[in-house]
Amino acid sequence: MPIVNRIAALHEEATAWRRDFHRRPELNFDLPRTAALVAERLRAFGCDEVITGIGRSGVVGVIRGARTSSGRVIGLRSDMDALPIHETSGVPHASAVPGRMHACGHDGHMAMLLGAGKYLAETRNFDGTAVLIFQPDEEGGHGARAMVADALMERFGIDEVYGMHNSQDPVGTIQVITGAASAAVDWIDIRVEGKGGHAAKPHVAVDTVLVAAQIVIAAQSVVARAVDPLGSAVLSLCAVESGAADNVIPHTAVLRGTVRTLSRQVQDLVERRLRQVVEATAAAYGATATLTYDRACPSVVNTPAESAAAAVAAAAVLGEGGVQRDVEPPMGGEDFAFMLEERPGCMIGIGQGGAFGLHHPSYDFNDEILPIGMSYWAKLVETRLPA
């Protein structure tokens, strides 16, 4: 792999940063230590500007190239937050905070962008400006939106924006998808109201447990029979709440879950048909049901020119054989989508292998890919803003 020598020399230091972040995970927007360390390192690297508190707890570092005559500005984004999961990895650098861990690799994402920032601040071999974006609350789905609402794009004059996320694909690969690269994330809440009563007299009650069970079954027909088989949709009802006694028919029941889609057309269809199915199924049993449908996060949509640029940078690091273009988009969500609604750009996947996938309590980021990620960021800036 043609890793830049200076970046290869940063491997040990970046590993130390990553493991330090891993030991002290912080959640959502509450990132006082994490954000402070990121800002401290960016200042030490010699960034031209370091700004904190964007989107509540986001950090931005600005690095101007040896020339800025192009006037072009690109944003590079990393997430910072951890997850409320108790770690069982057993690694020496495991989380020192019970019930919290970096189970999605955001510690590695930060280390890779910091390493690239150090290299770019030293070399400045580009014509334009690189804006390093460290975002809070990706897991909650609100951090990117908060930074955008805080005028991130306008304040720094960002023309295009790029993201990166580790995957369980093989080490030495980068995945570049043009178009939809993640699913839209919608949350659903179904509240069923019937008529409570004694379990021995079901004929004078309206059993909400029965109604809820029928809704669970009927809801799957939306994906199975309403969505084009060539479309993509997932509908999962994951929580059921009803009743507290074994001889009482409960008056209410609640179902909660999620819908994942890759296109607005399918998203609209699923919401419309699910509402019809929920209401009609409840009515058939003499109950009423109300669906609350929350479109929490749109789909990541990578734009063609910027996806091509990402592939060029990836190939400069891994060779053409390491760039995977024809891969299926995952149905997980990613709030980088809010940044891509504001500016063109691309989010790539970077393979790290591993026995445990994202959000598993034994997951750990693979430090061997740190030079690959750092090199990708550096090559992206140097090829997108050529000196």
Image (cartoon, rainbow, N blue to C red):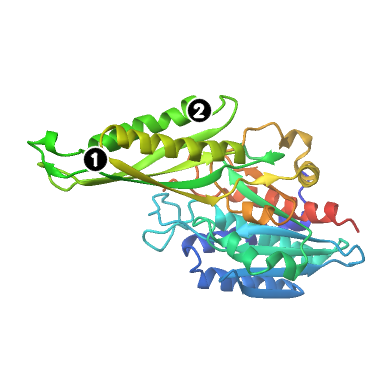
Percent coordinates x, y for residue 339 in the rendering:
66, 56
Which quadrant of the figure has residue 230? top right
Tell me the residue at 73%/37% (across/down): 323
In terms of secondary structure, where does tag 2 sit? helix
Q: Is residue 322 visible?
A: yes
Whether residue 185 is situated above or below residue 213 in the rendered picture? below
Kind of residue indicated by mark 1: Thr
Question: In this orientation, which residue lies closer to the viewer: 29 or 114?
Answer: 29
Tell me the residue at 85%/61% (across/down): 72
Left-right relation of 253 to 169: left
Question: In this orientation, which residue lies closer to the viewer: 291 or 164?
Answer: 291
Q: Earlier in the sequence, mark 2 or mark 1?
A: 1
Q: Which mark is residue 292?
A: none
Which quadrant of the figure has residue 387? bottom right
Left-right relation of 24 to 215: right
Query: Can you identify the residue that label 1 sits on?
Result: 208
Tell me the residue at 70%/69% (across/down): 61
Query: Can you identify the residue that label 2 sits on?
Result: 226
Left-right relation of 115 to 197: right
In terms of secondary structure, where does tag 1 sit? helix
Left-right relation of 101 to 43: left
Percent coordinates x, y for residue 46 in the rendering:
75, 74
Tell me the residue at 72%/71% (across/down): 45
Kind of residue indicated by mark 2: Ala
Tell me the quadrant of the picture where the N terminus can be found: top right
Whether residue 82 is situated above or below residue 264 in the rendered picture? below
Whether residue 199 is situated above or below residue 111 in the rendered picture? above
Question: In this orientation, which residue lies closer to the viewer: 365 or 238?
Answer: 238
Which quadrant of the figure has residue 287? top left
Percent coordinates x, y for residue 284 in the rendering:
30, 32
Q: Is residue 263 visible?
A: no
